[in-house]
Image (tube, rainbow, N blue to C red):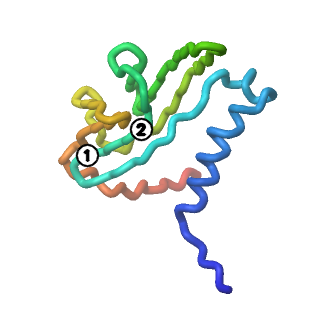
């Protein structure tokens, strides 16, 4: 049997750690919030983030902010159901922040929510960035 290493294995491990460790009592006190599972897509003209947020009202329970090149998602869930002999509730805060790529036009970001998936699109500047420059060194005597 030959095992094949796949690059996407590491993000799965980090996603597991981020979402699962928050469930342990010793970790709850540290963050108070659970992670949000996301997918990121970068094209020449836009950065796209898709986040799993099923069962939430995006207008009431989801907040998106962008500051200093960082896109942050925050969501709150509060759900209660009552049956004849018992009741159940689920609640929690969910947060996730990602650094936007260079050239992101933060003020033109748009978001839409459909079937439990939040999609945030941030256009990228179409101006070509200089590749860098060489800095001359001056000898001081």
Q: How many marks?
A: 2
Q: Is residue 28 above or below residue 50?
A: above
Foreground mark, 2 or 1, reads 2
26 left or right of 12?
Answer: right
111 left or right of 32?
Answer: left
Residue name at image x 42 percent, y 17 percent: 61
Q: Position of residue 41 (x, y in %)?
A: 35, 51
Indicate the quadrant containing the N terminus: top left, top right, bottom left or bottom right.
Answer: bottom right
Seen from the viewer's position, the closer of residues 41 and 136 is: 41
Q: SS of the residue at dot 2?
A: strand
The quarter of the picture where residue 18 lies is top right
For residue 51, the mark is: 2
Q: Is residue 77 above or below residue 103?
A: above
Residue name at image x 29 percent, y 34 percent: 114
For residue 94, the mark is: none
Q: Position of residue 103 (x, y in %)?
A: 29, 42
Name the residue beneath numbered marker 1: 46
Spatial separation of the CA atoms under disc 2 and disc 1: 16 Å
Density class for disc 2 (Cα within 10 Å; few <14, some 14-19, many ≥20) is some
Q: Position of residue 73 (x, y in %)?
A: 45, 27
The answer to which of marks 2 and 1 sits earlier in the sequence is 1
Q: Is residue 73 above or below residue 89?
A: below
Seen from the viewer's position, the closer of residues 90 and 42 is: 90
Q: Position of residue 6 (x, y in %)?
A: 55, 70
Residue name at image x 56 percent, y 54 percent: 11
Density class for disc 1 (Cα within 10 Å; few <14, some 14-19, many ≥20) is some
Q: SS of the residue at dot 1?
A: strand
Seen from the viewer's position, the closer of residues 65 and 90 is: 90
Give the farthest residue toward the front. Answer: 84
Give the farthest residue toward the left. Answer: 126
Q: Is residue 114 above or below residue 90?
A: below
Give the farthest residue toward the bottom. Answer: 1
């Amino acid at each position: 049997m030959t095992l094949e290493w796949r690059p996407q294995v590491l993000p799965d491990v980090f996603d597991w750690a981020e979402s699962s460790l928050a469930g342990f009592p010793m970790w709850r006190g540290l963050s108070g919030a659970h992670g949000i599972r996301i997918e990121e897509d970068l094209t020449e003209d836009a950065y796209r983030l898709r986040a799993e947020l099923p069962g939430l009202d995006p207008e009431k329970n989801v907040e998106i902010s962008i500051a200093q090149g960082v896109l942050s998602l925050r969501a709150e869930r509060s759900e209660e159901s009552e049956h004849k002999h018992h009741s159940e509730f689920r609640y929690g805060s969910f947060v996730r922040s990602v650094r936007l790529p260079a050239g992101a036009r933060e003020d033109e970001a748009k978001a839409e929510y459909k079937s439990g998936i939040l999609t945030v699109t941030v256009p990228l500047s179409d101006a070509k960035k200089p590749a860098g420059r060489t800095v001359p060194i001056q000898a001081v005597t």
